[in-house]
Image (spheres, coloured by chain):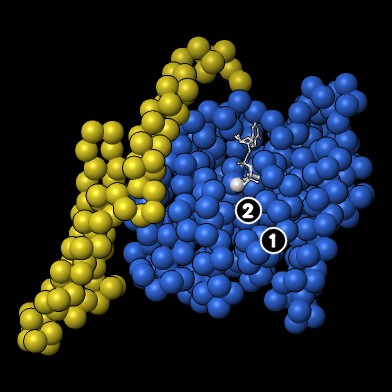
Amino acid sequence: MSLFRLFFRAPSAPAARERLQVLLAHERASVGDSDLVTKLRDEILRAISKHMQVDDEKVSVRMERGAQVSTLAVDIEIPFDAGKKAA
Amino acid sequence: MGKVIVVTSGKGGVGKTTSSAALGAALAQGGDKVVVVDFDVGLRNLDLVMGAERRVVYDLVNVIQGEAKLTQALIRDKRLETLYLLPASQTRDKDNLTAEGVAAVIGALKSSFDWVICDSPAGIERGATLAMRHADVAIVVTNPEVSSVRDSDRIIGLLDSKTLKAENGERMEKHLLLTRYDPARAERGDMLKVDDVLEILSIPLLGIIPESMDVLRASNLGSPVTLADGRCPPSVAYFDAVRRLKGETLPVAVPGEKRGFFGKIFGRKAA
Ligand SMILES: Nc1ncnc2c1ncn2[C@@H]1O[C@H](COP(=O)(O)OP(=O)(O)OP(=O)(O)O)[C@@H](O)[C@H]1O
Ligand SMILES: [Mg+2]
C-alpha cells in the first residue's frame, strides 16, 4: 500500500462504531419483531388489504433505520377499479 | 438460468461472509446480475458487511413462510445496480427454513439472476446443508491452519453426498479459496503451505486472499472489499478468483512471493 493512501485515508473505526450503535439500538428494541417500524408496516399493509385486493408485487416497502429517525416508505399501485373488487 | 454457488467451510470465522460479499460485488462490478443470500439464520452478518443493515425490511424466513414476496425481501445495493442481498432472519429460528421453501426461493432467484451466491453458516447442521443443497458450484473457504483444513475435508464429503447434484449422480464442481493467508507467517514457516493444503484437499485452487487490514476496513465501512478499494491486494485476489470462476485460466499469485516464479509452479493448479 502506498504511503499516500495510508496517510490520507480517514480511519474506519468511527464509522463502524456509529453503524453498530444504530443497528443494535434497533435490534434491542425489536425483540420478537415488535419494533414500531415493523408494526406500522404490517398494520398499514393490513389496512390496505381491507380496501383492495393487494397484489404483493405491486406493493413495495422500504425502510431505513436511522439514529434519530427511521423512515418507512410504502409504495402501492392502486388500480382504478380496486375498490369495487374488494367490496 | 443463473448459477448457484455455495460459499461454505465447516469451520466458523474463516471468511465465508467476507468472501460472499466480495465475490458477489466483483461479479456485479463486471455487469452480471447477482444476488447474495444469507443462510445464517439467527446470526446474520452479510447485511452488515454489505452495508445494508438499516434497510432490511423482510428476510428469507418471511419469504419462506409466505409473509412477504421474494421481490419485497430483496435489497438492492446502493452503489451497484446489479447487486442484491437477500437477508437472513435475525429473530427467527433456523427451523423455519424448510427444504421446500428453500428450493422454491433458489429456483425463483435462478431464473432472474446470473449468479445466486449462498453464504453458508458454519457447522454441518441444517443451515449449512440447506445452503449447499441446490448448488451448481461450491467454494470451500479454508484458512491455512489444521482445524480449518480438516473441517473443509468434512464439508467436501457433504458436498459429494448431501447435495441434489450428488444425489442425482452428478459431479459437484468444487473450488478452494484459501483466505487469511499471512505472508509473514508463511515466511517463518509457521503456516501450512499452499501446496500442502491443495494436496490434502485435492480440489482446484480458486484463489489466495491475503490477511489484510483492507478487509477489516471495508467491513467497518459496510462495503464489500472489492468496492471499498478495488486495488488493494485482497480485492485484486478476489477479482482474479472471479475470472477463474468464469473459466479463465490464470496463474495464482501467492501473497508475499514473486508472481513470476510461483506463477509457474502454481499455474497448473489454477482452477
Ligand atoms: N483476508 C482477510 N484479512 C483480514 N481479516 C479477514 C479476512 N477475511 C476475513 N477476515 C475477518 O475475519 C472475521 C471472520 O470473517 P467472516 O465473518 O467473513 O467469516 P465467516 O466464515 O463468515 O464466519 P461465520 O462462520 O461466523 O459465518 C471477520 O472479522 C473478518 O473481517
Ligand atoms: Mg458468516
* Ligand 1: image quarter: top right
Q: Residue at x 71, y 35 (%)?
A: B180
Q: Residue under mark 1: which chain is it in? A: B
Disc 1 C-beta below 8 A from ligand 1: no
Looking at the image, is mark 1 or mark 2 nearer the viewer?
1
Marks 1 & 2 on one chain? yes
Q: Position of residue B163 (x, y in %)?
A: 72, 72
- Chain A as rendered: colour: yellow
A37 with respect to B153 (left or right): left
Residue type, label 1: Glu
Q: Secondary structure at mark 1?
A: loop
Q: Residue at x 49, y 31 (%)?
A: B220
**Gap between marks 1 and 2 measured at Cα:** 9 Å
- Can residue A65 be seen here? yes
Tell me whether the residue at label 1 lies in contact with that at label 2, contact meaning CB atoms closer than 8 angstroms: yes
Q: Secondary structure at mark 2?
A: loop
Q: Quadrant of the C terminus of chain B?
A: bottom right
Q: Residue at x 78, y 26 (%)?
A: B183
Q: Quadrant of the N terminus of chain B?
A: bottom right
Q: Label for residue B125? A: 1
- Chain B as rendered: colour: blue
Disc 2 C-beta below 8 A from ligand 1: yes
Q: Position of residue B173 (x, y in %)?
A: 75, 65
Q: Label for residue B121? A: 2
